[in-house]
Amino acid sequence: MSIAFTFPGQGSQAVGMGKDLADQFAEARAVFEEVDEALGQKLSDVMWNGPADDLILTANAQPALMAVSLAAMRVAEARGLDLAASVAFVAGHSLGEYSALAAAGSLSVGDTARLLRIRGAAMQQAVPVGEGAMAARLGLDFDAAAEVAAEAAADQVCQAANDNAPGQVVVSGHKAAVERAIEIAKGRGARRAVLLPVSAPFHCGLMQPAAEAMAAALAEVDLRAPAVPLVANVLASAITDPDEIRKRLVEQVTGTVRWRESVTYMADAGVTTAFEIGTGKVLTGMIKRIAPGVTGIAVSTPADIDALMDHIASA
């Protein structure tokens, strides 16, 4: 099989996302209702009507993005999609890993929504506002960016958080250390090194309290083997064992999102088409830069789902 399904992470959210699916398909409406019930909150109202300031809150954005991805999946399944028969791998960027697992049947939608609410809140609360930061380095490869982060850390935390694409690495940690890393990176030939507008320093050692919260939360849910292998963020390779999946989800909170390597792994395994299931086209753009031989296609609208099903039927 030459198809992978990928699932977007935080930053892809936008007011109105998923509304067209809910308007046209009962299967999609059922997903949004299940998420609302699991959270005890009308999250769908925030998703469709805003305000944007509420939607971008980490505790809202994470389950909201998952909800749109799973709504698109349920519509495709109603149209005849058989994930195990058509798709070689699932993979998600950061929170998207939870969407990928829900799509592959490892987690229920309700459990995934609750886990992401816990995850978002725990990540937000792990570091006082203003103490942490993240910055993008454009033009440095991963090894160079990691060296810069280590040099800038001194007695603080600063580490490579996201290896997104060639020459696109994000570092995370204490704000002062991240600011030092920006200056060092500029002197090492980075085309651009800028602070990102994020609410917390994700995927670094400062997130350890959130990792502990997720270890406790994941221990309480029923997590089954996925219908197709998950390419894990922290491994950049495929896994299916539920106990290992739990372990890697905990490690992911403080570990590097190895997206560039994950896409390369799937390409080397024969994937030629990667569908981004959910809101936005961020992963599609990254995939085109990482693996030119892989076609990235975003799937978020009813017309996109039609195209997805046509592709699978002709494959």
Image: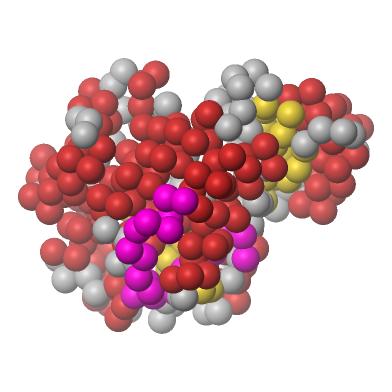
Instruction: Name which residue lies at 52% across and 79% down.
Output: 270
Instruction: Name which residue lies at 35% across and 70% down.
Output: 224
State the count of labels.
0
Q: Position of residue 164 (x, y in %)?
A: 63, 50
Residue 117 shows in the view = yes
Q: Give the main secondary structure of the magenta stretch.
A: loop
Answer left or right for 169 relative to 215.
right
Picture quarter containing residue 73?
A: bottom left
Q: How is the image coloured?
A: secondary structure
Picture quarter containing residue 203?
A: top right
Q: Is 49 colored magenta in this rendering?
A: no
Residue 272 shows in the view = no
Q: Which residues are magenta?
A: 216-235
Q: Position of residue 206 (x, y in %)?
A: 67, 37
Q: Position of residue 260 (x, y in %)?
A: 63, 58
Above or below, 102 against 64 in this view is: below
> Could you say which is closer to the camera, residue 205 or residue 144?
205
Above or below, 245 against 114 in this view is: below
Q: In the rendered image, which quarter contains the N terminus?
A: bottom left
Instruction: Name which residue lies at 32% across and 39% down.
Output: 64
Above or below, 297 against 123 in this view is: below
Q: Is 222 colored magenta in this rendering?
A: yes
> Could you say which is closer to the camera, residue 315 or residue 102?
102
Q: In the rendered image, which quarter contains the C terminus?
A: bottom left
Q: Position of residue 151 (x, y in %)?
A: 90, 39
Answer left or right for 251 relative to 80.
right
Picture quarter containing residue 190?
A: top right
Answer left or right for 234 relative to 249.
right
